[in-house]
Structures are given as structure tokens and as C-alpha cells.
Image (tube, helix red, strand yellow):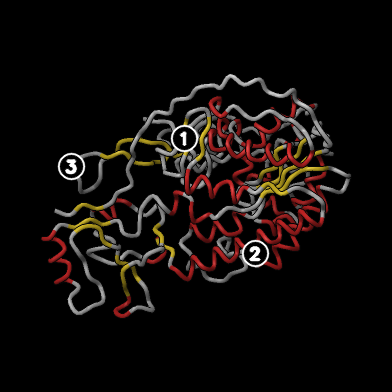
């Protein structure tokens, strides 16, 4: 009987103990943290479990940093709060037991929030309660910061801009009159393409295209010129290898297990083709117009999107009885494009740090250690494994509260080292992890 690799959950409890270490008294060093501005996209805004909701905003890394900055003179930090916890503009993801269309036993799966949302009116402009310190705008690329009237096409910007119909996002950054900033831009310039499975047609309105390196450089330089204009100091963040996120790792390319009977049956089905199955784990079969017969098996290093419909694999036989549509996978060529873009963007970030004399918080390096070895805090271990790892939320791309706290601590280390400050670290245990059903 065949066994297909299905997105599942191994659940664990995380224990923690507090070390008995006397911390150094907080000092501000050479920076002024009185008015903090956070510039970024969805990770900065507090997107968690694929949606914007109040608890996620309270678990965002800028909100955590602002609380720690208060120990060294930091002031009020305003966020564009949403009203509820169910998610906006779509329901957040949650864990629940579901019944497959062709299975007799229910299984644990990531599903959209079930029930009415609690964010009525969230689309309305709330600038009168600002200006906001957290200017993270979900669904933004660096180049969007130079687009006049961008908020007309972005519901998140539209609710918190002073002049949503006419302003460029880069101009709105000056409303806080900030003294310190963080900038984390560039993730969505490449993640959108990757999360869509590549294979995206060139178009002036296609949001999934990878941003050209030259355009990225120009826009990032404009953001840096703006945030440093009044002598503000801060730190800028590098861009991680997005392909290491659980969104691309939860379902392995070699994720189909066959017994002898089904391996033999499928080999007869695909007789005289390049497709071959063995007893044990096998690569999925995908559509590929460049391959003989228009399909082939995935290869080592290629990736499957986490959101591939599970019932299509279970019931319709995607990847074994019939080829899986290519949009659900990332091929070697697409992976090379993504990683080349990330490398180029990070070269720009490092150059901007040098040009503006601003320290670079190497989140790329920090997350790589998480991807490879995990991160430890007070006796608990966090990894990039979906659900069980505790670092990433249920969408496989954004962090849990505890993941954000660990990222915030890596940023604080950079700030303390460069500015001679002694800002205390965030207590990771005070924030949320993956919520079990």
C-alpha cells in the first residue's frame, strides 16, 4: 500500500529555565533611541500565520525592540493596530484535524481560520492616531517606496499614510521625526516569486517578479538617504536565504513512499519513459515542457511549495499517477535565479551600511544558523521545522512571537556592539509560539 508524505505535525513541549546572571545596567551608548522608526514589509509589520492580527503585531520584532529601547531612553512607539485577532484581510492559519476527501482517518493540518473575522472597518485610514513608529507595510518591495500613490493599491499602507493618494512611501517615513531606525527591506522582492513557484510571466503589474538589482539599489539608496536625513542612527538588516524557510521544506521533493506493489505498477504505467520508481522514498513527478513527454521527476535540491493541495496528492494522485503542475515546485533554474538575486541584494545592503556608516545586522547569517543548527534560549531549542520547531508560524514564511524575539535579540547584539550601548535582551519566553488545537 502506498504511503505519501503528507504535511504533518510532530508536537513537542518546550521547557525553559532562567539563568541566575546579574545583567549590566542599561546604557544608551552613542545613539538616541527616543523616537524609533521601523521600516520594512510583512515581517516588520507583524504578519503571523499569513495574516495581520493584533497579537501578531504585539509579537513583531519592532514592538519588542521599542520596549527594550525604553530602558535606555526610548519613548512612545505607535503601531497601526488592527482591532481583532482573527486576521486581516484574510483569516489567519490555525491547526486543526481535517477529513480528507479520500481518507478514512482525519489528520492534523494547517487550515484557514474558521468563523467570522473580527476586523470590521480595519481598512479605514487611522493616521490621526499616528504618526506610526512601525511603518512595516506588508506586500511591499523596495521599489514600491518610490511609487507615488502606492497606498491606493496597498490596503496596509492606505490605512496608515498621512497622504495615501499622493505620497510615496519613502516620503511618509519622515512623519515620525525619528532619532533611530531599523530597515529590513528586500525579502518580498524575491520571496513573492519563490512562493508563487516561479514561472511568472513578465508584466508591469505582476507583483511576483524578482526586482532587478539596479532598481533595488536605487530604491534602497533613496530609503537610506531619507531615514538618515536628520542625523538619525540605526541598523539595517540583510536578507536571508528564503528557500530555507519551512514553506519550501515541509514537503520534501523525495516525499513519496511506495511499497513493491505500487512501485511495480507505476513503472508499468510510465514504461519507456525517463520516470522510474523504487521501493521506498521517491521523487514526485512534475510537468516540465522542456522534458521528454512533457514531464519528469524532481531532482535533488529542487523544492515543493508547502501549500500544494494535499487532497490533490492524496486523491488525485498528483506527483505519481499524474504529473504535478510545475507552478507548485521550484526547479534548479528558478532556485539559481532566487539565490542570485538575494546575493545581489545583500551586496547592496552591505554597501549601504558602508556608505552611510550604519551597522549591518546580519540576519541572513543568524537565520542560517537557525536553519542548520537551531537556536537556543533558556534551555529551549528552536528550529526552522514547521510547527515542531517553534520559530516559524503556520504560514512557513513569517515568525512566531518567539522567533521574532530571537531575531530582535540578534539585532540588539549588533546595536550594542556598534553604539556601545547595553540594551537588555528580549525574554523570548514572554511571547507566543505555535498554538496547538
State the image coordinates of residue 373 (x, y, percent, origin top left): 47, 45
State the image coordinates of residue 175 (x, y, percent, origin top left): 82, 41
How far, Cα to Cα, is label 3 from label 1?
A: 35 Å
Mark 3 vs 2, N-terminal side? 3
Mark 3 vs mark 1, foreground winner is: 1
Residue density around tag 1, few if under 14, some if 14–19, many if 20 or more, within 10 Å? some
Q: Quadrant of residue 270?
A: bottom left
Q: In the figure, 362 relative to 125: above or below?
A: below
- For disc 2, the marked residue is 344
Mark 2 vs 1, N-terminal side? 2
How far, Cα to Cα, is label 3 from label 2?
A: 49 Å
Task: Report the disc number at residue 381.
Answer: 1
Looking at the image, can residue 226 be seen?
A: yes
- For disc 3, the marked residue is 104
Mark 2 vs mark 1, foreground winner is: 1
Q: In the figure, 109 relative to 242: above or below?
A: above
Dot 1 lies on which element? Answer: strand
Q: In the figure, 70 relative to 46: above or below?
A: above
Mark 3 vs mark 2, foreground winner is: 2
Amino acid at each position: 500500500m502506498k504511503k505519501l508524505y503528507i504535511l504533518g505535525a510532530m508536537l513537542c513541549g518546550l521547557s525553559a529555565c532562567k539563568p541566575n546572571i546579574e545583567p549590566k545596567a542599561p546604557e544608551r551608548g552613542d545613539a538616541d533611541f527616543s523616537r524609533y522608526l521601523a521600516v520594512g514589509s510583512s515581517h516588520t509589520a507583524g504578519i503571523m500565520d499569513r495574516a495581520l492580527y493584533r497579537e501578531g503585531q504585539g509579537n513583531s520584532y519592532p514592538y519588542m525592540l521599542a520596549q527594550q529601547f525604553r530602558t535606555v531612553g526610548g519613548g512612545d512607539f505607535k503601531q497601526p493596530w488592527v482591532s481583532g485577532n482573527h486576521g486581516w484581510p484574510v483569516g489567519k492559519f490555525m491547526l486543526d484535524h481535517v477529513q480528507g476527501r479520500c481518507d478514512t482517518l482525519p489528520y492534523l493540518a494547517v487550515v484557514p481560520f474558521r468563523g467570522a473575522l473580527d476586523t470590521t472597518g480595519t481598512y479605514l485610514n487611522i493616521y490621526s492616531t499616528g504618526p506610526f513608529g512601525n511603518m512595516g507595510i506588508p506586500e511591499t518591495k523596495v521599489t514600491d517606496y518610490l511609487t507615488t500613490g502606492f497606498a491606493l493599491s496597498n490596503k496596509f499602507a492606505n490605512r496608515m499614510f498621512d497622504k495615501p493618494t499622493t505620497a510615496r512611501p519613502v516620503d511618509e517615513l519622515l512623519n515620525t521625526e525619528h532619532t533611530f531606525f531599523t530597515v529590513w527591506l528586500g525579502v518580498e522582492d524575491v520571496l513573492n516569486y519563490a512562493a508563487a513557484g516561479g514561472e511568472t510571466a513578465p508584466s508591469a503589474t505582476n507583483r511576483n517578479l524578482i526586482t532587478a538589482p539596479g532598481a533595488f539599489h536605487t530604491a534602497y539608496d533613496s530609503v537610506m538617504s531619507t531615514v538618515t536625513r536628520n542625523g538619525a542612527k540605526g541598523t539595517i538588516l540583510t536578507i536571508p536565504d528564503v528557500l530555507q524557510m519551512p514553506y519550501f521544506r515541509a514537503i520534501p521533493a523525495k516525499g513519496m513512499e511506495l511499497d513493491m506493489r505500487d512501485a511495480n505498477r507505476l513503472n508499468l504505467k510510465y514504461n519507456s519513459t525517463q520516470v522510474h520508481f523504487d521501493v521506498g522514498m521517491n521523487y514526485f513527478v512534475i510537468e516540465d515542457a522542456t522534458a521528454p513527454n512533457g514531464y519528469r521527476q524532481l531532482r535533488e535540491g529542487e523544492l515543493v511549495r508547502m501549500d500544494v493541495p494535499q487532497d490533490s496528492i492524496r486523491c488525485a494522485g498528483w506527483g505519481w499517477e499524474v504529473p504535478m503542475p510545475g507552478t507548485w515546485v521550484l526547479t534548479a533554474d528558478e532556485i539559481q535565479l532566487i539565490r542570485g538575486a538575494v546575493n545581489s541584494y545583500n551586496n547592496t545592503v552591505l554597501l549601504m551600511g558602508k556608505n552611510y556608516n550604519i551597522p549591518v545586522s546580519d540576519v541572513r547569517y543568524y537565520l542560517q544558523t537557525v536553519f542548520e543548527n537551531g537556536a537556543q534560549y533558556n534551555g529551549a531549542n528552536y528550529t526552522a521545522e514547521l510547527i515542531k520547531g517553534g520559530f516559524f508560524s503556520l504560514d512557513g514564511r513569517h515568525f512566531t512571537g518567539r522567533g521574532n524575539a530571537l531575531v530582535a535579540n540578534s539585532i540588539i547584539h549588533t546595536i550594542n556592539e556598534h553604539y556601545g550601548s547595553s540594551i537588555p535582551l528580549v525574554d523570548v519566553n514572554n511571547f507566543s509560539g505555535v498554538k496547538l488545537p
